[in-house]
Image (spheres, rainbow, N blue to C red):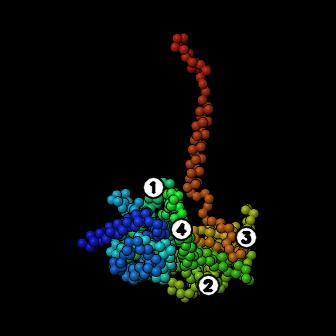
Amino acid sequence: MVAEQRIRMMSGRFCVAVFLAVLCTFSSGKCDEQVPLMLWTSEGSGLLSQAVPAAGHVVGITQLSSYLETALGSAPRNVLLFLQDKMSIEDFTMYGGAFGNKQDSAFPNLEGALRSSPSPLVLPTVAWPATNAVIGQLQDQLDTSPLYMDPEMLSQLRLNASTPALLVFRLPYSTGADLMSAKEVLRGNDEVIGQVMSIMKSQSVPYTAIYTAMRPSRQVSSSLSMDMEAGVGGGRSLLQYGDRKRERERQRERERERERGEKKVNERTGVYPPVEFKEGGTGCIMLWAENLTVSVLRGGRWERHDLTSLTFGEGVTPRLQGSLCNQSHSSLVLNYENILGHRSFKLVFAMSQRHYKVSARRWFTLDSVEIEYDGQKASFNGSRNVYAPAEYSYRCQSVTNFRYPLLVPRTSKDPANQWRVSFTDFQIQGFNVAGGEFSYASDCAGFFSPGIWMGLLTSLLMVLVLTYGLHMIMQLHTMDRFDDPKGPAISVPQTD
C-alpha cells in the first residue's frame, strides 16, 4: 500500500512537471530562468512532512535553504550532489517518456531512485541563482568542504555514516542540431547516477542525493514574441508600443537581477585566490588547487582530511613559516594544526631550477612533496613527472601518488607508503612570479596521447603495406611470347 501511494505521488509530481512545461511554453513569465531540483534519500522520512510548492511557485534561495536544512536534519548526512551544467523541466517532458513511452526514457535510474526512496522531493521550478548557491548552502549546513568525484574515485573511497561528506559529481549537457545528442548526454548522465547508486548500495552507506543544474537549458526569447506582436498589423503598433517598452524595461531589469545574482554566487562559491609567498615584498611562489586532500592508512582503512578550506578561500590566511625562495631553490611550507590526530602538520613543496644543455633553457622541477607530522617525515619524489620551463607555471588536473601517480615515495620503507595525497586542478609556480599572477601554464597532458600514438602507428603500418603492394605490382612484366593454338606449340628447352 505504501509503495502504491509513493508511485501515485511520483506520478502526480511528474504530471505537475508536464503541466509546468506547457505553462512555460505559452506564458511570458520567467520560466526560462528556472531549473528543476530532485532530492531523495536511502533512508529516513524527513522529506514527507514538507509541503510541495504550488504549481507555478518559484523556489528561491531562502526557501531552498529551508528545504535542505529540514531534509538534512533527519536524512543521512552523506550528500551526493549531481550538478549538471544545464537543465530545464522540458528535458524531462521531451526525453523522460512523460507521455507513456517509458521504454524510451532517458532517466530510468533517476526514476527508479525516486520510486525506491522513502522520502523523495521534486521541485520543478527553482530559481537558478538558488541552485548555483546549493554547494555553499550544503557546505555551511554540513560543515565540510565539497569533494569533486567521479564513480571511479567513489569506488576507492570508504565513507563513514557518522561523518558528513559532500560529494559533487559534475555532469555535462549538450544541445546541437541533432536532438538525439542532448538525449544521449542525458542518458549518459543517468548511467552515472545509476553507477553511483550501485556503489553506495554495495558499501551499505546511507546517503542523501540531489540532482539539479547550474543554468536552465531552455530559454524563451522575449524579442521573438515582440517581433510576432509587431507583425500582426500596423493598426495596433501604436497601442502596443507602450507594452513593448514596458516589456523591454522588464527584460533589462531581469538582466540586472541576473547579474546581481551571478555576482552574489561568485562571491559565495567563486574562484578563490591562490596562495602566494613573498620574499622581500616581491612574490616568488604561487600555489592553487581546487582540492587538497591527504589520507593516512590506519587499522586497514584510509582516514581522509580535506585541507582546501584551511588553505584557500575568503578570509583564510595560511601560515607559510619556513618557506623560502632564491634563484635556484624554492620551498613552500603550509603549516596546519590538529590534522588526522597530529598536533603539528606541514605540507612542503620543494622546487629547484637549473639550465639543461640539451634544450638550451632553464627548467624547474617539483623535487619533492613532503608531509611533516610530529617530528616524522613522509617524502614523495615528483621530479620525474612534475616539471616545466622556468618561465612557466605547471598545471595538472590530478596530481596523486596512488592513481596514475605523478608522485612516488622516495624508498620502499619511507613512511610515505602509509600516506596518500591528492591535488585536483593543481597549479604551481616556484620561480619568476610577476604581478601576482601565474605565468603561462605547461599542462601535464601531452599533445600525443595514447590514442593519437595508436592512430599514427596504425596509419604508418597501412601505408607500409600499401607501399609494398604497389612495389610488387610494379615488378610485374607482360609476356613477350604467346602460344598460337593454330600454329606449332612453343618449345621451351628444359636444359641450357
- Residue lying at the far front in this picture: please name it: 235
Considering only order in the chain, which callout, 1 or 3, is on the residue closer to the N terminus?
1
* Residue type at the position of mark 1: Met
Would you name the residue on which mark 3 appears?
354
The reply to whether callout 4 and callout 3 are in contact (CB within 8 Å) is no
Evaluate whether residue 296 shows in this view: no
Q: In x, y percent, where is residue 275?
A: 63, 79
Q: Earlier in the sequence, mark 1 or mark 4?
A: 1
User: Which element is circle 4 on?
Assistant: helix
C-alpha gap between disc 4 and disc 3: 71 Å
Mark whose residue sits in front, 2 or 1:
1
Label 2 element class: loop
Q: Position of residue 289 (x, y in %)?
A: 59, 74
Between circles 4 and 3, the one closer to the viewer is 4
Of badges 1 and 4, the one in the foreground is 4
| Disc 2/disc 4 C-alpha distance (Å) | 54 Å
Q: Say which amino acid is labelled 4.
A: Gly
Residue under label 2: 317
Going by the numbered disc 3, the residue's amino acid type is Arg
- Can residue 73 be seen here? The reply is yes
> Which residue carries the number 4 mark?
242
- Viewer-proximal residue among 451 and 13: 13
Residue behind mark 1 = 180
Whole-angstrom CA distance, mark 3 to mark 1, is 53 Å
What's the residue at 50%, 74% (across, down)? 129
